[in-house]
């Protein structure tokens, strides 16, 4: 037992959990916490509806769907498309160009502004 002036060792105060609860550590987060609650509620509700749909499809569906699934017919055949689209190289080049456009400016900024002459830090 602890003395009357001491707190029990299992008591945790909220200010000690500031690293877990950002709303306590950062007051600028308090106005948006209601939006976080709404988003969490919507996400939870959608997950419940998804699993209810999954379970009810497995349990309540007595007969298979009587009609076949309709597939769309192609408006033109492969002879109307350029032969270039049948090769892998243009698609790889396009993917690399898009990746460079997406990540290039950020990587260039990091390379230009990151100091690489820092001393190592001993962690032990």
Image: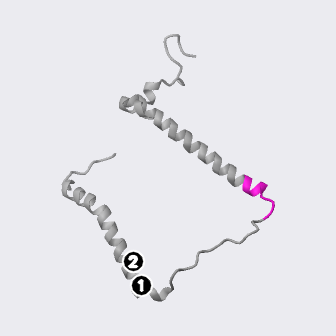
In this view, the residue in front, 34 or 63, is 63
Label 1 CA crowd tier, 10 Å (few <14, some 14–19, many 20+): few
Instruction: Note whether 73 is above or below 110 in the view shown.
Output: below
Q: Is residue 27 magenta?
A: no
Q: Which residue is mark 1?
A: 87
Spot the residue most to the right: 62
Q: Report the Cα–Cα distance between label 1 and label 2.
A: 8 Å
Asked where in the image residue 111 lies, by quadrant, the reply is: bottom left
Location of residue 13 in the rendering, given as x and y in whole percent from the top left corner: 48, 23
Region rendered in magenta: 56-63
Q: SS at mark 2?
A: helix
- Residue under the point 27% across and 48% down: 121
Residue 112 as seen in the image, left or right of residue 11: left
- Please name the predominant secondary structure of the magenta segment in the image: helix
> Which residue is denoted by mark 2 in the rendering?
91
- In the picture, residue 62 is in which quadrant? bottom right
Q: Which mark is residue 67?
A: none
**Which quarter shows the N terminus?**
top right
| Residue 115 pos. (x, y %) | 19, 53
Secondary-structure class at tag 1: loop
Tell me the residue at 44%/84% (across/down): 81
In this view, the residue in front, 26 or 66, is 66
Counting every numbered tag in the picture gives 2
In front of the other: 20 or 87: 87
**Image quarter (top left, top right, bottom left or bottom right) of the C terminus:** top left
Verify CB contact (< 8 Å) between mark 1 and mark 2. Answer: yes
């Amino acid at each position: 037992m602890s003395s009357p002036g001491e707190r029990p060792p299992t008591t945790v105060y909220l200010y000690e959990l500031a690293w877990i609860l950002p709303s306590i550590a950062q007051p600028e987060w308090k106005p948006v916490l209601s939006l976080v609650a709404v988003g969490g509620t919507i996400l939870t509700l959608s997950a419940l509806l998804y699993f209810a749909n999954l379970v009810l499809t497995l349990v309540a569906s007595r007969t298979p769907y009587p009609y076949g699934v309709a597939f769309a017919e192609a408006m033109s055949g492969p002879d109307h498309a350029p032969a270039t689209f049948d090769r892998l190289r243009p698609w790889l080049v396009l993917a690399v160009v898009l990746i460079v456009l997406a990540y290039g400016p950020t990587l260039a900024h990091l390379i230009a502004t990151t100091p690489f002459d820092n001393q190592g830090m001993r962690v032990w």
